[in-house]
Image (tube, rainbow, N blue to C red):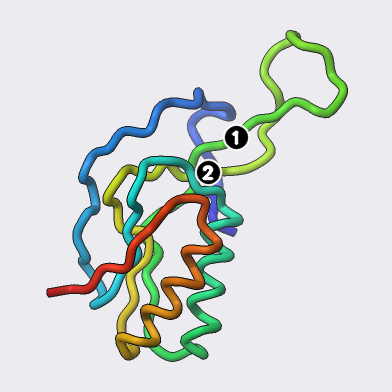
Amino acid sequence: MLYPKRTKFRKYQKGRSKGSHAAAQLCFGKYGIQSCEAGRISYQGIEAARRAITRKFRRNGQIWVRVFSDIPITSKPTEVRMGKGKGNPTGWIARVSQGQILFEMDGVSLSNAQAAATLASHKLCLSTKFVQWS
């Protein structure tokens, strides 16, 4: 669900995650989930976290997903010898920098938003923290 319809290239190089401060402030909601480290999140992890937040809110409030998985990940099949080129695309990831806002929430109470953020952080493979608009 969370991957592009088409890309300029079929395969990308892995790249390195940097600790820039892009998208480090809340723009849409009162509460948010912020990454504490740089890394990569799969499209399944993003969707699982979004579902966890939605179910906690019981379809009340509003959620903004601030990350998008637009980089394909390749892997070779099992029991294949080394060499013979790069593997086929198997999934999609999003590169996340340190301090980047991943999700934003609004229209719910503080305690409900904190509980939803805790549930969502268990689905993500990065360490995150709950942030509040001040």
- Relative depth, front residue between 23 and 18: 18
Q: Is residue 110 above or below residue 70?
A: below
> Which residue is depicted at the point 22% across and 73% down?
132
Q: Residues within 10 Å of mark 2 (few under 14, many from 20)?
A: many
Q: Residues within 10 Å of mark 1 (few under 14, many from 20)?
A: some
Residue at image coords 34%, 76%? 105
Residue 34 percent coordinates (x, y):
32, 59
- The location of residue 7, given as percent across then percent down, is 51, 37
Farthest left residue in view: 134
In the picture, the disc for residue 73 is 1
**Viewed as shown, does residue 37 lie left or right of 22?**
right
Residue beneath the point at 35% across and 53% down: 35
Residue 53 pos. (x, y %): 48, 76
Of the two numbered discs 2 and 1 on the same chain, state the one appearing first in sequence: 1
Is 70 on the left or on the right of 114, as rendered? right
At mark 1, the secondary structure is strand
In contact (CB < 8 Å): disc 2 and disc 1: yes
Which amino acid, mark 2?
Answer: Ile
- As drawn, the label of residue 93 is 2
Residue in the picture at 40% in, 64% down: 65
In the rendered image, which quarter contains the C terminus?
bottom left
Which numbered marker is on residue 17? none
61 is higher (above) or lower (below) than 70:
below
Residue type at the position of mark 1: Ile
State the SS at label 2: strand
> As displayed, is residue 76 above or below residue 56?
above
- Residue projecting furthest to the top: 83
The N terminus - image quarter: bottom right
Which quadrant of the view contains residue 87? top right
